[in-house]
Image (tube, rainbow, N blue to C red):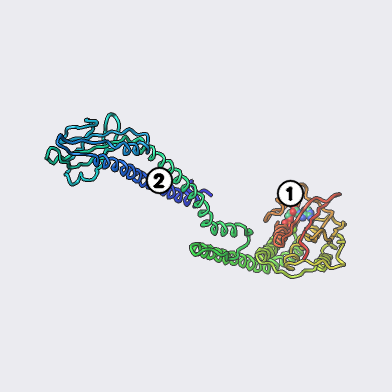
Amino acid sequence: MRDNGALSLRERLMLQLLVLAAVLAVALFVAVRTVAGSAAEETLDGVLGAATIAVADELRGGEEGVSVDLPHEAFSILGSISEDRIFYRIAVDGATITGYDDLPLPEAARSPAELSTPIFYTTQYRDTEVRVAVMQRVVLAGRLSTAVTVLVAQTRAGQAEIAARVANQAAGIGLGVFALAAVLSILTAGSVLRPINRLAEAVGRRGPSDLRSVDHPSPAELRPLVDALNGFIARLRAGLMRTETFIAEAAHHIRTPLATVRARAETALRKAETEEARETLRAVIRAVEESARSASQLLDHATVVYRSDRPERESVDLARLVAGLAQNFQPVAGLKDVEIHTEGVTAPVEVVGDRLLIEAALRNMLDNAVKYSSPDSEIALVLSRKGDEACVEVADRGRGLSGGAQPDLTRRFARGANVGDVVGSGLGLTIVEEVAAAHGGRFELAERKGGGTCALFWVPLG
Ligand SMILES: Nc1ncnc2c1ncn2[C@@H]1O[C@H](COP(=O)(O)OP(=O)(O)OP(=O)(O)O)[C@@H](O)[C@H]1O
Ligand SMILES: [Mg+2]
């Protein structure tokens, strides 16, 4: 989820862990290289020093001066370690007795005590870098104590090769550590973010009208967020409840005076003497009827909205409910010579739900059927079981929907284009649809074959 191009928590966490892993891998690479490099140098220096000592041990003093018997074994050990070239120089007071006389002496002067064991330095010699071991031995030559300097040098190709090998291995180890850390960082980011994702899923799964507080188990760091969310939900619920109560009370308080106005207007209509006055009074009565209908539907709708949040879960016998409603509507239908035929109401059909809500829905469907029926027609009120659902069908032979689509007609306050002459508020089908949804059912409205409208209300069987 991106917000204004900012990195997601997962990306942030992974980026930081990867940077950390990269730094650690580089540090490991440098450490392995340095340690292994200096270990290799120490080993090679040891061999070079041993060869130098072996040469120094062969120094002999005599009447004629210093002589040396070069120990070839020492040089062959040096040669066996690598293909490097070897140079030596034996000098007395800077004058070479044998060997390469351009082999450079150490830059800084060393004391004889220091030079009693080999000292090592790296220097440039004949266009290449060499490692030099130098030491001194005091020999009696012509009765004089003479300090003889022994230098043994070796080119560094062997060490460079070892260093390159070690560097390769160190790079391999570094890369391995980085890859392992990358995998671990993906797993860590996943596990750190899992509680957040679970919480988001739990909240996201909720229905649009689910205003229960969130009690999903979440880590301590998320508690303030969950508490804030619950506080917000509680305030929203209280606000909604106040609104619904207000609507219900307002509707209730409007209906009573409207009834008085209507009664007075009807009396006045009977007494009116001019056609103009009668016309006005009829308009007043019609407006009052509309208002009363709206008030009563608003009241019903407020109840439905309020109860849909937590519908009762009781066993409802649809057969009895449907039969009762048919009986209640008989007188109104009778005024238009409309007959209501019930079917499937002899045996009980049990569903689990809120009796009051289901009754409100069915009443509105039947009200529409009666209201929009042509005089002297029939209404089929059929209750049936279909699969694991119960279905109440209300089919009339009225004016039909004249092309009106269900989604348009079920909207709040939406009315069809062909019903201007009938009093209505446009809330009836909204109520029906909300009740069906609250019970996990559905509502369908369609033109009936052969004319009229067919309304179907489905609820899962209990
Ligand atoms: N049985 C029907 N025959 C013809 N049209 C219908 C029928 N049932 C619903 N309609 C159409 O759907 C519209 C919406 O119905 P709904 O019940 O929501 O509102 P209403 O009947 O106009 O007003 P009220 O809220 O007073 O019931 C109606 O205005 C009408 O155009
Ligand atoms: Mg209606």
Q: Nearer the viewer, residue 45 or 315?
A: 45
Element carrying mark 1: loop
Q: Position of residue 146 (x, y in %)?
A: 14, 39
Image position of 375 (left or right of 78):
right
Q: Residues within 10 Å of mark 2 (few under 14, many from 20)?
A: many
Q: Position of residue 304 (x, y in %)?
A: 68, 64
Element carrying mark 2: helix
Q: Residue at x 80, y 61 (%)?
A: 390
Callout 1 amino acid: Ala
Is residue 429 something one can see in this rendering? yes
Name the residue beneath numbered marker 1.
Answer: 405
Name the residue beneath numbered marker 2.
Answer: 29
Q: Quadrant of the C terminus?
A: bottom right
Numbered label attached to residue 352: none
Q: Residues within 10 Å of mark 1 (few under 14, many from 20)?
A: few
Against 288, residue 178 (above or below) is above
Callout 2 amino acid: Phe
Mark 2 or 1: the one toward you:
2
Mark 2 or mark 1, earlier in chain: 2
Q: Residue at x 83, y 61 (%)?
A: 385
Q: Nearer the viewer, residue 122 or 338?
A: 122
Is residue 421 something one can see in this rendering? no
